[in-house]
Image (cartoon, coloured by chain):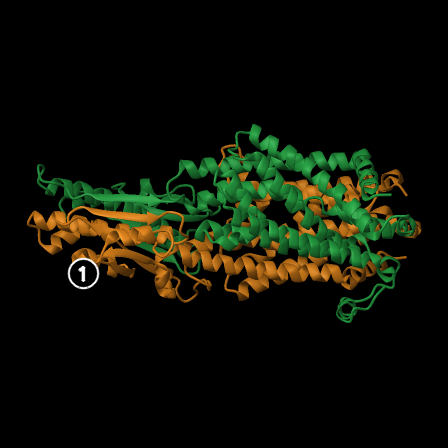
Chain colours: A orange, B green
């Protein structure tokens, strides 16, 4: 029996399993879902994108009738806010938090301005930025005009710094779904590594199912009696699973590119994923050796995957000094840098050495243990 | 023979299993990890202005800066940007070679210009081919606005007569910020409900295990109704879950979490576990084996989590009455010290009761069918057709 026969059998087992194919479909759902959430939240948190999308009716601000024709009204309208006029401003205050996101009014002499904002509204950051800008400009203009300065001088004081943006390499622009910093940060900083690692979470489940399942069905003896070495059995068991996961990740890379989230350095990413996959599969096989049934294996792998999620993703969200020395070596951080940088620095290879070493060590330990018949407890 | 005997057998078998106890305590260690994460989030949020839930990206993008005046460069966020002091020619070459994402040029006499009341023209050169250019533009823009505002205020203060009345802006906010509510309320309520979703395997083992071990025949031959078998088995799981919830609740209280009405919180989580276990047993009763049940459950739990969490988010933004349909909303309201009305409680309890009755009824009906327990298993369409035509088994 050649190892190719085992490889073919394992590959067929995976591809014929409707449940694995269903899980692949679930991943597509997750990919599109997270992409949609990223787009929506990017628009909701960006004043410019919100203006462009025409969701202006969501941002209703209550103002008194007396504001009509004033500079304050002009400034608020310049911020593209939907103003709702009230004869009695106390009526507007009653609607704050339900129909209205904010209420703006000034005292009778038009000097002091009061802004009441609903902090719990999803559009609070945008509405707050817009109103603050309008009110601050109104206030400063009022102050400066009263000192006798002309409008040009007032504008110089209001905007002492002017930032001009010049784009280079315009012949080859990054083809992004939306031009938003939040979108870039959340997509590359979390969603891309999360999506690309999903197949490897599934791989740990497949490998435990493959090993423990064979043992439960009493078919492992047949494989072990075949004229191939234990290492080749391991190779035959793991390579199809690894290949299945890598192919999924490659498909997700292609899909992300089609969704206009360009993934750079795909070859380096796939190489890194190969080693991460070895680590995941190694852990899966090690666990399979210590459990008695598929049920136990599923429970144990779930716990291990929860821990893996903490190790891989929590450093991205928690600013803690104890993470700092390791941050650049964490596989998810490496993936973020690889996926988002068109021209990567060669140093990245050095940073990926610990991941490669840990994965190879885990896999080597698995092979060594697997050679002992007692470890697989037939 | 009553269902309590089945419950006793199941509980005995579960609590005697060393592996179950190991997993039970591993789940507790997951909770402890989550408490650490939770506290880190809250600390981060409470220590910063401008709250946002985005990953902290160390050296995410690189920026070259020529700023002899130091007007901007010292204020740019160093956490997300890797800043290199450079000059025009070398930086433009570095952009062309893809070694940096952008270059910021600030005139050397920037500070003097501002003090003389003139505008400072800064230029940022961005590499269009790098997707991170918008991050750079946003960071520099924000920094320029902060610096600009600071200088504006100084200039305004010097231009405005000292003894004149200064117009004021009174800012008031109502409600708690959305990210803070999500972290403090939603994450805590998810932590409290998490044990409910961790015991699916126990239900599967209790029902599918009987099929796989071929012990279902003995069970159905016993002098006990199908309904009592299902209720007995599920009660064992519900009691185990309530024990885990109780331990989690005590740990959270000891860790300093502010949980008002802990008894009512516990009662509602306990009640919620009844329909969740019912729905799980429904999937388990129909499944042929562990694997199938496991995958079916994973998909179903996505729906259950959605049903529980979405109304919570709706309640946070809209305070809608219908959001009380989710027990999670009531629990969140209870531990934050709110007092829901009787109609709010009745909506939650009606939902729990309806789901429980439907799920247990379906499970019992499935368990009564020989073709489901012993095979060949009928398809879902066939089951529906039997149900609609009142076909008896």
Q: Position of residue B121 (x, y in %)?
A: 23, 53
Q: Residue furthest left?
A: A148
Q: Quadrant of residue B375?
A: bottom right
Which residue reaches farthest top? B254
**Left or right: A101, with A356 as reference point:** left
Q: Which residue is mark 1?
A: A68
Residue drawn at (47%, 60%), measured in percent from left and top? A39
Q: Position of residue B207 (x, y in %)?
A: 81, 50
Give the secondary structure at mark 1. loop
In the image, taking residue B225 as reference, residue B157 lies left or right, namely left
Of residue A224 and residue A36, the one placed in the foreground of this image is A36
Name the residue rendered at 74%, 56% in the picture.
Answer: B361
Where is residue A163 shown, x and y percent of the image? 27, 54
Of the 4 image quadrants, the one containing the N terminus of chain A is bottom right
Choose between B46 and A291: the one closer to the eye: B46
Q: Is residue B81 above or below residue A100?
A: above
Badge 1: few (under 14), some or many (20 or more) residues near its Cα, within 10 Å?
A: few
Point out residue A143 in the picture as x, y percentages from the top left corner.
13, 47
Quarter holding the C terminus of chain A is: top right
Q: Outermost residue toward the front?
A: B342
Residue A263 visible in rendering: no
Relative to residue A312, is residue A243 depicted above or below? Answer: below
């Amino acid at each position: 029996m050649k190892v190719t026969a085992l490889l073919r059998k394992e590959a067929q087992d995976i591809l014929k399993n409707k449940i694995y194919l269903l899980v692949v479909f679930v991943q597509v759902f997750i990919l599109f879902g997270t992409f949609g959430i990223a787009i929506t939240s990017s628009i909701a948190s960006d004043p410019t994108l919100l203006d462009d999308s025409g969701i202006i009716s969501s941002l209703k601000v209550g103002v008194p009738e007396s504001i009509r024709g004033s500079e304050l009204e002009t400034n608020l309208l310049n911020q593209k806010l939907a103003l709702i006029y009230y004869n009695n401003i106390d009526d507007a205050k009653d609607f704050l938090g339900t129909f209205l996101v904010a209420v703006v009014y000034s005292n009778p002499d038009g000097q002091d301005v009061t802004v009441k904002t609903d902090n719990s509204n999803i559009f609070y950051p945008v509405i707050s930025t817009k109103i603050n800008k309008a009110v601050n400009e109104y206030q400063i203009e009022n102050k400066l005009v009263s000192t006798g300065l002309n409008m040009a001088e007032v504008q110089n004081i209001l905007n002492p710094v002017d930032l001009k943006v010049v784009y280079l390499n315009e012949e080859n622009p990054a083809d992004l779904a939306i031009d938003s910093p939040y979108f870039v940060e959340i997509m590359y900083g979390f969603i891309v590594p999360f999506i690309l690692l999903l197949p490897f979470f599934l791989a740990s489940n497949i490998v435990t199912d493959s090993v423990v399942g064979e043992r439960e069905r009493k078919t492992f003896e047949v494989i072990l009696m075949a004229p191939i070495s234990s290492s080749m059995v391991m190779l035959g068991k793991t390579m199809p699973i690894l290949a299945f996961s890598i192919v999924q990740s490659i498909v997700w890379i292609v899909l992300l590119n089609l969704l206009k989230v360009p993934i750079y350095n795909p070859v380096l990413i796939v190489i890194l994923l190969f080693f991460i996959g070895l680590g995941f599969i190694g852990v899966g096989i090690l666990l399979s050796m210590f459990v008695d049934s598929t049920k136990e294996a599923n429970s144990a792998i779930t716990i291990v995957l929860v821990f893996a999620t903490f190790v891989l993703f929590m450093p991205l969200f928690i600013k803690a000094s104890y993470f700092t020395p390791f941050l650049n070596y964490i596989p998810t951080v490496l993936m973020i840098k690889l996926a988002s940088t068109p021209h990567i620095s060669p140093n990245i290879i050095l940073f990926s050495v610990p991941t490669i070493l840990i994965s190879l060590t885990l896999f080597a330990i698995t092979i060594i243990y697997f050679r002992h018949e007692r470890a697989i407890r037939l | 023979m009553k269902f309590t005997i089945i419950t006793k057998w199941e509980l005995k078998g579960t609590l005697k299993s060393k592996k179950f106890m190991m997993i039970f305590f591993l789940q507790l260690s997951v909770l402890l990890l989550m408490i650490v994460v939770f506290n880190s989030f809250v600390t981060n949020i409470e220590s910063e202005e401008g709250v946002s839930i985005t990953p902290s990206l160390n050296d995410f993008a690189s920026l070259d800066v020529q700023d002899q005046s130091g007007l901007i460069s010292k204020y740019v966020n160093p956490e997300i940007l890797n800043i290199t002091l450079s000059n025009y020619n070398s930086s433009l070459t570095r952009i062309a070679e893809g070694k940096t994402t952008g270059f910021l040029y600030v005139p050397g006499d920037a500070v003097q210009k501002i003090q003389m009341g003139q505008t400072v023209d800064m230029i940022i050169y961005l590499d269009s081919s790098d997707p991170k250019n918008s991050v750079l533009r946003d960071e520099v823009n924000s920094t320029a606005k902060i610096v600009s505002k600071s200088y504006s205020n100084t200039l305004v203060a010097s231009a405005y007569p000292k003894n004149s009345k200064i117009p004021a802006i009174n800012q008031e906010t109502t409600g708690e910020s959305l990210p803070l509510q999500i972290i403090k309320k939603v994450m805590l309520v998810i932590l409290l409900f998490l044990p409910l979703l961790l015991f699916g395997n126990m239900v599967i083992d209790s029902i599918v295990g009987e099929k796989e071990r071929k012990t279902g025949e003995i069970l159905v031959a016993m002098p006990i109704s199908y309904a009592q078998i299902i209720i007995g088995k599920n009660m064992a799981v519900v009691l185990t879950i309530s024990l885990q919830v109780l331990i989690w609740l005590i740990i959270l209280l000891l860790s300093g979490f502010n949980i008002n009405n802990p008894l009512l919180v516990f009662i509602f989580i306990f009640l919620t576990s009844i329909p969740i276990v019912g729905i799980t047993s429904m999937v388990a009763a129909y499944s042929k084996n562990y694997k199938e049940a496991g995958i079916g459950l994973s998909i179903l739990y996505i729906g259950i989590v959605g049903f529980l969490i979405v109304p919570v988010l709706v309640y946070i933004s809209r305070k809608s009455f219908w959001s009380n349909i989710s027990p999670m909303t009531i629990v969140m309201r209870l531990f934050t010290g709110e007092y829901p009305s009787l109609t709010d409680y009745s909506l939650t309890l009606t939902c729990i009761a309806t789901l429980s009755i439907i799920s247990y009824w379906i499970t019992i009906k499935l368990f009564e069918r020989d073709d489901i327990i012993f095979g060949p298993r009928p398809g879902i369409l066939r089951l529906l057709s039997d149900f609609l035509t009142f076909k008896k088994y």
